Image: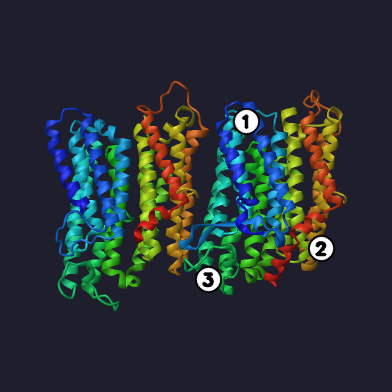
């Protein structure tokens, strides 16, 4: 509750403040300060189990350690993102303060979709996340690509929201007592009524769209490519994993008892997502676009939590959220500083900017899933959860073959950085401050720390 | 001995010391100092390993050699490491070969030598972890970690086509180990629980896992492909000649001297005890593949003109024999494999050192361009001839003992396989002696004209290897003693 209210308030403060503040760096510092405070308050709520605000939400929101831990992960990643890339918001345009305000509104929406217990609040939360995002995608106003991305995102997003509303309506009609509460929709595990089944499929489609699972992923590469890189970083990490979290919570709480009846739909989604994501990523020349496709591929792995739906899968999802977000935020942060976004633009980075190159290597190894990094542990938890379900072993085998393919495109960047050279007078990256380097190192240490001791995070789920 | 009084155990020392030494090496910018540091630290590791051999008796000194820490106990994995006979043997090999490699390549100067030597020491640490792991998850992690530094070593300091060759190697092993990961998880599902978790990753739990024959048949291949890629066994060997050719000399030595033993070791440690029924079912297929690989590699080795590729193919043939011998599951052949794992490490490193010296000295490694080296470098020639004879397993050399025992087991198992494998031994004599003749004897040509003989360092290193060749050629008993218990425990499980 703390997070929902405080992010909303702070968002308003930032927006109004934008009218008075002329100084450019002040909004950034305000945003970082606000986020830090909110993160601390959320951790307090996690520890004490109760919020500062005593509001009767009529059970429409559910706060437990699982949800709150996830919100902490999301807030922590956003904080890291702001610390790394806060300065780059100034490059997008004039209205820095407004961008931060929109960011806080998104966070408020994320807190809602991580805790919803009613389909209505799911819908509201998704909209609160999406609408500021449409604006942010198009925030580079003079850039045609950014405009195109925003329009595309808006049209497709509106379409998927429509499908979601239709699904919710079906579920409302099909539920026994006419209720929006997700735990009241079905009872028992008998065969699914037609209305519920229709609603389920519609919700599956719309949520797959939000998490960019194939075959509903077509917007992703263009939007990620067109949006300002800073925004892409946020969109591909925190927002994506939050949508995933909502996805899994919805299907676990609403349809968990009928898991076996819709599991095969998830199998199709996983197969398609892994295949499309990995195969298209191989052919990308632009690192930004490659990361967009790789985010689709990673979504395929996260979908395993929906496939397995056991305790290990839930732990794995939170771990995956943290591991994937940390590594991708780090990678995007470096990408923002690069002059040339193609793979060849990374040639010789190891010589010119050793700190950037080494930390980027850690991020890429984590995304590939090499042991000692958080990426390995999260993939390990996911695969373990999937194998423990005891069937569809071929799907797991398919997934690891895709992971081996992913090594190709991640290692291509490593090869460029260390094994290829560029003449000394070419400046590869600019605007690198010592603080930025230190933050990158801290991020790498976090990734390795989580890779060694994933229980640091997963133990919080059981407080 | 009370375990509480022991504050650090041998496997811990063997893993952490090279790791710390490697991290220290990264910080030493001075090339001379970092070389000295690499040699000193690898000697300290060797000293630790030798001490551990003194305390190798498991019944008396169990707590010196085994330790377990809580790690991911809620999913049933602890950080358990320990050394049994086989572990002692291979950690000793690792500890012995690193100083040899460092001294032999001491003359070679690398750009960013601090990173180079740091990565080398990290590789050593990773391989020690593989040999000491008593928990499958720990094993898996070290298994992958050992490859990462090698990947960077080969891609940064290798030959012209290094990036593609090394990447091929990496993707092969990475795909293999991921398949193994699924196998691990599948067996894990069938293990008994611990106090904290419903299943366990510990070695004993895996040995006791209840898998039906049908399940074993599937999971066996998931494991075996990963190990077969590493060894490499035909048809998974295609990465090897390219990688050996392109990698820098010291990395090639690590790869062929120690890293391929990881595959052999892993088959004995994990596949034989966990999947006894599948092993019985597929033994003919695996031995068949190994023997085909031997024959194929030997035939190609005869045609090779590049010395590095030549040694690579001869190594495939040797490893094929080891793999075949393991799957005969007889005591004799398993003991032969143990001896041969150690000795092959020594012989192949000797070969690589000579090849490296030739290349550095003459500027080429084409057999057709060399000739008459014996006139110019007589000492080198003597050493090479001894190592080459050991390579074709002449009696009195170390390889003879191992190969003889492996053949004894193979003969009992199946005459046809043994006969084909014996042809490969003859072929080995053909290609090795042919190479010796072409490179070292005959008239010196313009390329070999200005060759110099080897320096004192290199003489010393090769002399040490030759001592080992003769020592284990006439007295292999210490290796048998060391690995006796491992093998008898293993045979109990299989039967």
- Report whether residue A129 is seen: no
Q: Residue at x 80, y 40 (%)?
A: B464
- Identify the image's colour scheme: rainbow, by chain, secondary structure or one colour: rainbow
Front residue of A108 and B65: B65
**A83 relative to A417 in the view: left or right:** left
How far across and down, in percent of the image, does residue A112 sit? Answer: 21, 55
The quadrant in which residue A133 appears is top left
Front residue of B332 and B191: B191
- The furthest residue to the bottom: A190
Nearer the N terminus, badge 2 or badge 3? Answer: 3
**A31 relative to B22 in the view: left or right:** left
Q: Residue at x 38, y 66 (%)?
A: A310
Q: Which mark is residue B147?
A: none
Q: Chain of mark 3?
A: B
Q: Which mark is residue B192?
A: 3
Q: Chain of mark 1?
A: B
User: Could you give the CA–CA distance between mark 2 and mark 3, rounded to whole angstroms?
Assistant: 39 Å
The quadrant in which residue A84 appears is top left
* Disc 3 packing (10 Å; few <14; some 14–19; many ≥20): some
Judging by the rendered image, the residue that carries numbered circle 1 is: B34
Judging by the rendered image, the residue that carries numbered circle 2 is: B408
User: Do tag 1 and tag 2 residues touch (Cβ < 8 Å)?
Assistant: no
- Marks counted in the figure total 3
How far across and down, in percent of the image, does residue B219 sit? Answer: 56, 65
Q: Residue at x 17, y 67 (%)?
A: A180
Q: Residue at x 85, y 52 (%)?
A: B475
Nearer the N terminus, badge 3 or badge 1? Answer: 1
Measured along the vertical axis of the image, is residue A250 above or below residue B23?
below
How far across and down, in percent of the image, does residue B153 sit? Answer: 59, 38
**A226 relative to A447 in the view: left or right:** left
């Amino acid at each position: 509750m703390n997070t929902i209210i405080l992010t909303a308030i702070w968002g308003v403060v930032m927006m109004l403040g934008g009218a008075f503040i002329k100084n450019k760096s002040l909004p950034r510092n305000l945003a970082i300060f606000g986020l830090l405070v909110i993160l601390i308050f959320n951790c307090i709520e996690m520890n004490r189990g109760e919020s500062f605000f005593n509001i009767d939400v009529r059970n429409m929101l559910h706060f437990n350690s699982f949800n709150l831990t996830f919100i902490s992960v999301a807030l922590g990643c956003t904080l890291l993102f702001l610390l790394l890339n806060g300065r780059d918001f100034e490059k997008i345009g004039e209205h820095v303060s407004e961008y931060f305000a929109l960011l806080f509104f998104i966070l408020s929406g994320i807190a809602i979709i991580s805790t919803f217990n009613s389909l209505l609040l799911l819908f509201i939360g998704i909209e609160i996340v999406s609408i500021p995002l449409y604006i942010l995608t198009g925030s580079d106003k003079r850039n045609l690509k950014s405009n195109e991305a925003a329009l595309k995102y808006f049209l497709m997003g509106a379409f998927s929201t429509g499908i979601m509303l239709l699904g919710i309506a079906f579920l409302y009609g099909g539920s026994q007592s006419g209720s929006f509460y997700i735990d009241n929709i079905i009872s028992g595990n008998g065969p699914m009524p037609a209305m519920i089944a229709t609603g389920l499929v519609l919700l599956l489609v719309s949520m797959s769209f939000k998490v960019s699972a194939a075959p509903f992923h077509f917007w992703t590469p263009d939007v990620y490519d067109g949006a300002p890189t800073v925004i892409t970083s946020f969109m591909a990490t925190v927002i994506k994993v939050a949508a995933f979290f909502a996805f899994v919570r919805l299907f676990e709480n609403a349809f968990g008892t009928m898991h076996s009846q819709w599991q095969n739909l998830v199998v199709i989604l996983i197969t398609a997502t892994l295949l499309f994501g990995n195969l298209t990523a191989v052919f990308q020349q632009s690192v930004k676009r490659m990361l967009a496709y790789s985010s689709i591929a990673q979504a395929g792995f996260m979908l395993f939590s929906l496939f397995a739906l056991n305790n290990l899968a839930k732990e794995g999802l939170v771990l995956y959220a943290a591991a994937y977000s940390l590594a991708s935020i780090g990678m995007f942060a470096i990408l923002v500083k690069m002059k040339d976004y193609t793979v060849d633009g990374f040639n010789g980075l190891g010589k010119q900017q050793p700190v950037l190159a080494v930390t980027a290597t850690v991020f890429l190894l984590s995304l590939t899933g090499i042991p000692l990094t958080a990426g390995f542990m999260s993939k390990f938890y996911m695969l373990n959860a999937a194998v423990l379900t005891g069937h569809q072993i071929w799907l797991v085998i398919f997934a690891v073959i895709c992971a081996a393919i992913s090594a190709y495109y991640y290692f291509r960047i490593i090869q460029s950085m260390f094994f290829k050279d560029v003449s000394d007078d070419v400046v590869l990256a600019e605007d690198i401050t010592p603080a930025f380097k230190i933050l990158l190192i801290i991020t790498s240490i976090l990734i390795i720390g989580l890779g060694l001791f994933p229980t640091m995070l997963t133990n919080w789920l059981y407080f | 001995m009370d375990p509480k009084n022991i504050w650090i155990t041998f496997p811990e020392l063997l893993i952490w010391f090279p790791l710390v030494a490697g991290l220290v090496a990264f910080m030493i910018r001075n090339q001379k100092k970092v070389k000295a540091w690499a040699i000193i630290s690898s000697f300290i590791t060797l000293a630790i390993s030798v001490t551990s051999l003194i305390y190798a008796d498991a019944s008396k000194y169990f707590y010196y050699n085994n330790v377990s820490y809580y790690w991911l106990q809620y999913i049933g994995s602890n950080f358990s490491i320990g050394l049994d006979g086989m572990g002692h043997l291979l950690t000793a090999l690792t500890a012995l070969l690193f100083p040899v490699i460092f001294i032999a390549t001491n003359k070679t100067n690398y750009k960013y030598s601090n990173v180079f030597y740091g990565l080398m020491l990290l590789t050593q640490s990773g391989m020690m972890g593989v040999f000491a792991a008593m928990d499958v998850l720990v094993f898996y992690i070290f298994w992958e970690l050992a490859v990462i530094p090698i990947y960077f070593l080969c891609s940064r300091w290798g030959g012209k086509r290094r990036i593609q060759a090394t990447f091929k190697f990496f993707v092969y092993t990475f795909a293999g180990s991921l398949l193994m990961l699924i196998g691990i998880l599948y067996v894990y599902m069938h293990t008994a629980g611990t106090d904290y978790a419903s299943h366990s990753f510990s070695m004993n739990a895996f040995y006791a896992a209840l898998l039906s024959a049908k399940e074993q048949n599937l999971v066996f291949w998931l494991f075996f492909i990963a190990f077969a890629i590493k060894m490499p066994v035909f048809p998974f060997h295609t990465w090897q000649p390219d990688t050996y050719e392109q990698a820098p000399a010291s990395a090639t030595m690590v790869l062929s001297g120690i890293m391929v033993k990881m595959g052999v070791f892993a088959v004995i440690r994990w596949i034989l005890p966990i999947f006894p029924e599948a092993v019985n079912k597929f033994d003919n297929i695996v031995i068949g593949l190994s023997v085909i690989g031997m024959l194929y590699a030997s035939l190609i080795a005869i045609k090779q003109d590049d010395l590095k590729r030549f040694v690579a193919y001869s190594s495939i043939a040797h490893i094929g024999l080891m793999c075949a011998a393991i799957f005969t599951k007889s005591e004799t052949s398993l003991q032969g494999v143990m001896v041969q794992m150690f000795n092959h490490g020594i012989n192949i490193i000797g070969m690589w050192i000579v090849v490296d010296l030739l290349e550095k000295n003459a500027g080429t490694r084409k057999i057709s361009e060399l000739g008459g080296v014996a006139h110019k470098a007589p000492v080198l020639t003597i050493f090479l001839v001894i190592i080459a004879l050991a390579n074709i397993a002449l009696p009195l050399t170390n390889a003879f003992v191992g190969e003889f025992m492996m053949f004894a087991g193979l003969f009992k198992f199946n005459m046809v396989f043994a006969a084909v494998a014996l042809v490969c031994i003859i072929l080995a004599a053909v290609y090795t002696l042919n190479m010796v003749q072409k490179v070292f004897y005959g008239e010196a040509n313009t390329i070999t004209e200005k060759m110099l003989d080897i320096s004192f360092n290199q003489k010393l290193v090769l002399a040490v290897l030759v001592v080992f060749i003769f020592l284990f050629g006439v007295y292999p008993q210490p290796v048998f003693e060391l690995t006796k218990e491992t093998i008898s425990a293993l045979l109990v499980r299989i039967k």
